[in-house]
Image (cartoon, coloured by chain):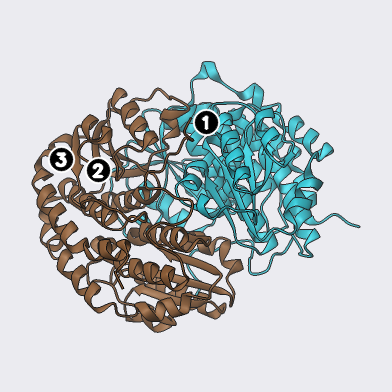
Chain colours: A cyan, B brown
Amino acid sequence: MTPTLMAQEIAQQPAAIERTLDALLPARDELRTLAAGRRQVVLAARGTSDHAALYARYLLEVHARLGAASAAPSLATHYDVARDLDDTLVVSLSQSGATEDVVAFQRWARRHGARTVAIANEAASPLVEEADIGLVTRAGRERAVPATKSYTAQLTAVAVLADALGPSRASFASRLRQVPEAVASCLATRAGVDGAVAALIGSDHLLVTGRGIVFGTALEVALKLEETCLQPVRGLSYADLRHGPIAVVDADTTVLVIAPGDGPMVGSLADLAADLARRGATTIAVGGDPRVQAVCDRAVAAPALPELLAPLGLIVPAQLVVEALARARGFDPDAPRGLSKVTRTEPVG
Amino acid sequence: MTPTLMAQEIAQQPAAIERTLDALLPARDELRTLAAGRRQVVLAARGTSDHAALYARYLLEVHARLGAASAAPSLATHYDVARDLDDTLVVSLSQSGATEDVVAFQRWARRHGARTVAIANEAASPLVEEADIGLVTRAGRERAVPATKSYTAQLTAVAVLADALGPSRASFASRLRQVPEAVASCLATRAGVDGAVAALIGSDHLLVTGRGIVFGTALEVALKLEETCLQPVRGLSYADLRHGPIAVVDADTTVLVIAPGDGPMVGSLADLAADLARRGATTIAVGGDPRVQAVCDRAVAAPALPELLAPLGLIVPAQLVVEALARARGFDPDAPRGLSKVTRTEPVG
């Protein structure tokens, strides 16, 4: 059987990350100069790119100690607010570099004094051409509709940006260089993937949760499950889950708990997993440390990376689960119903 | 039959809004002085309060032209990041004034130079006692677990804050004074509520959508439906819905479209509703203009308020639908399973 395009592109990620590091690490000095004196970072993105933006938000706040937040593109596209953005760096993310309201937001931000960095997989795109600095990822052409290698390449660009804007003595470039090998090793073993698929195949009520640096990963896993398995799947932060939706967790619920292997979040994610288990849910750890894995019904192994870089690894075994689950349910992961590769926020015509 | 506590508290909202306006409008000069020179607003909240914070985010950006974004409380509670917040106003929202990670975030922000405003319904609470300015809402005691009047009182405080920080020539205090009467009129007519309940009662897959200023309302309606009807309900922005989850919209889906009666979002919300209808979904407009209502299967009337104040009105008919739907499904809206009045983000003990 020929592997699906999605499976092939998942397997291409170590090389895509490596090429992207080679291309972008040399841009760090230029990025540092561009961002000098800018205390606020605003991140503009939609869909999967917005999940990479959420990683950027936490990484820039925790590592680079800047204020960082998601943009509301409608400020530009609908409200056309007059703002003074001379303290702001706008970072826009779009695989195609053509997402209309992200392009519109970047134009609006430039008009109001922002400096701009665009992260896109297409050099010949309005987002890159109009930005002060374009960080062009090197994922190569992606043919399956669900984004995989283009997403990890975006995360790589985000990590390079945070390294550039963070304290130079705390550079994690050498750790970044270890990511391709850690991902390749995870792809080779697929530890826990089949067990997770078996636990998920009959589940009607799926949740994905995470916290802090890996929260964006949880949202991305939820979106990929939903796109490929045509079933509503929610991604919720630890806190949001506790503030309401946990009431609907019961024995019919399966929860994927996305957890880094170290850092300040691991304990609370282990407590959450134990609470979910007490409510009768089936729990599957993706990553995590022995505490998290001990309280979950199943565990999927993730690449061994420190918390600040964990999102580059954690998504990979989750992609393996998603691809295998879609096939097991009789769907074509390469071409989910109702989606096309470039999403327009505004209806056409 | 005695009305439920939730029904009684829904009915108390015109008075709660009026009392809150009386108490807080005089604080506007003090708020303006406190915020002078602060260009960034960071909003800290959880659950329902976070939906009021989302209104604050848009209103402060659109009306007061400040940068505004949600806090990540874990920056304080778990990562303990050292930041310079001397350009920042932190606004914290919690009905009890005791939500632990919101209190911790405010403490952290003060330590790092932020000025602070707390919005809470309890004057004798750590959040209010430790803030530079406490905006104490006057909802009165709330006994039903689902927040209703305490939420509209929070929205009222948010509107007063935005009025204080916005351009004085564009003050909307006089429009705010009209809110209690507009809400009372909506409560008296209940137009469209029974029809919406009939459409929702058998639906297994519920979505709630909104955009811009009213996006927070959509999230709040989704949470209230989920809490009281013990069914997973998603709140999605217009853009997020288009970027993926729209693929799972089909004839089994019922969508509540929360729409203001005017402003730049109405056309796109009408287009979205038409698209959802083409995919076979049952659509229910809450508010909206004649374009939105014409393309939806059902319409629930909302108080007549301009877009910037629409969230204070739109939630009210939605609360009526939620309360009636819970009863029609045999649930007790006052005491949903699995929830208590004060939610802790960290497990106790």
At horizontal 80% and vertical 33% (from top left) the residue drawn is: A185
Q: What residue type is labelled 3?
A: Leu
Question: Residue A309: which quarter of the image?
Answer: top right
Q: Residue A306: in sight, yes or no?
A: yes
Which residue does the numbered mark 3 point to in the structure image?
B31
| Label 3 secondary element | helix
Q: What crowding class fits label 3: few (fewer than 14 Cα within 10 Å), some (14-19), or many (20 or more)?
A: many
For mark 2, name the chain: B
Distance of mark 2 from mark 3, alpha carbons? 12 Å
Left or right of A13, for residue B156: left
Which residue does the numbered mark 1 point to in the structure image?
A162
Q: What crowding class fits label 2: few (fewer than 14 Cα within 10 Å), some (14-19), or many (20 or more)?
A: many
Question: Residue B297: which quarter of the image?
Answer: bottom left
Distance of mark 1 from mark 3, alpha carbons? 35 Å
Marks 2/3 in contact by CB < 8 Å: the verdict is no
In the picture, the disc for residue B119 is: 2
Q: What residue type is labelled 1?
A: Ala
Relative depth, front residue between A91 and A299: A299
Residue reaching furthest to the right: A1
Mark 2 vs mark 3, foreground winner is 2
